[in-house]
């Protein structure tokens, strides 16, 4: 599938980093929340065969559910859900920073974002 609006991961200012971090903090995107939401302890080795279970566990409509789907599970999410989850940023901001990509009518993550020892770590 062709992705439009994708570019390399690029954030230009410290203020932009702060704005992005605030989105994840406000959503509660932490190790503890991720583990609790995905119930990781109940799955020995999460992999593709567990994706239906993991999607079910993230279907609550919370911002953190959407962020987990995007940045950990790597699935496409409807643009309206992404916009709600990353507010006060918008989808265009995510595209400009290289965090998001358009995929048809949906949005997908261009990078994975993990929470590690109080830091957000982005990688592709």
Image (cartoon, grey):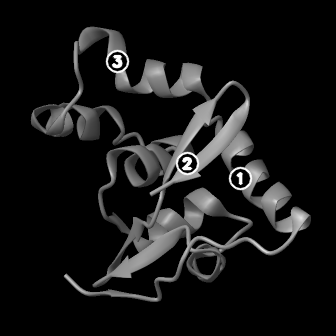
Residue 119, percent across and down?
Answer: 71, 36
Q: Do callouts 1 and 3 mark residues in contact (Cβ within 8 Å)? A: no
User: Mark 1 or mark 2, which is nearer to you?
Assistant: 1
Q: Which residue is mark 3?
A: 40
Q: Do callouts 1 and 2 mark residues in contact (Cβ within 8 Å)? A: yes
Decide: is 16 above or below 39: below
> Could you tell me how many numbered marks the image carries?
3
Which mark is first along the chain, 2 or 1?
1
Res. 38 image quadrant: top left
Residue 43 lies left or right of residue 28; in this view the side is left
The single residue placed furthest to the right in the displayed view is: 15
Numbered mark located on residue 63 in the image = 2
Mark-to-mark CA distance, 2 and 3: 19 Å
Q: Do callouts 2 and 3 mark residues in contact (Cβ within 8 Å)? A: no
**Which quadrant of the rendered structure holds the N terminus?**
bottom left
* Residue at x 62% of width, y 44% of height: 121
* Residue at x 71% of width, y 52% of height: 23
- Does dot 2 land on a helix, a strand or a loop? helix
Q: Which residue is mark 1?
A: 23
Numbered mark located on residue 12 in the image = none
């Amino acid at each position: 599938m062709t992705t439009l609006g994708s570019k390399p991961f690029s954030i230009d200012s410290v203020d932009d980093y702060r704005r992005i971090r605030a989105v994840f903090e406000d959503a509660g995107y932490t190790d503890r929340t991720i583990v609790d939401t995905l119930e990781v302890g109940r799955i020995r080795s999460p992999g593709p065969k567990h994706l239906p279970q993991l999607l079910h566990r993230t279907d609550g409509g919370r911002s953190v559910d959407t962020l987990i789907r995007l940045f950990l599970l790597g699935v496409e999410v409807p643009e309206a859900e992404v916009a709600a989850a990353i507010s006060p940023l918008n989808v265009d901001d995510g595209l400009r920073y290289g965090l998001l990509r358009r995929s048809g009518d949906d949005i997908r993550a261009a990078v994975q974002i993990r929470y590690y020892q109080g830091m957000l770590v982005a990688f592709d």
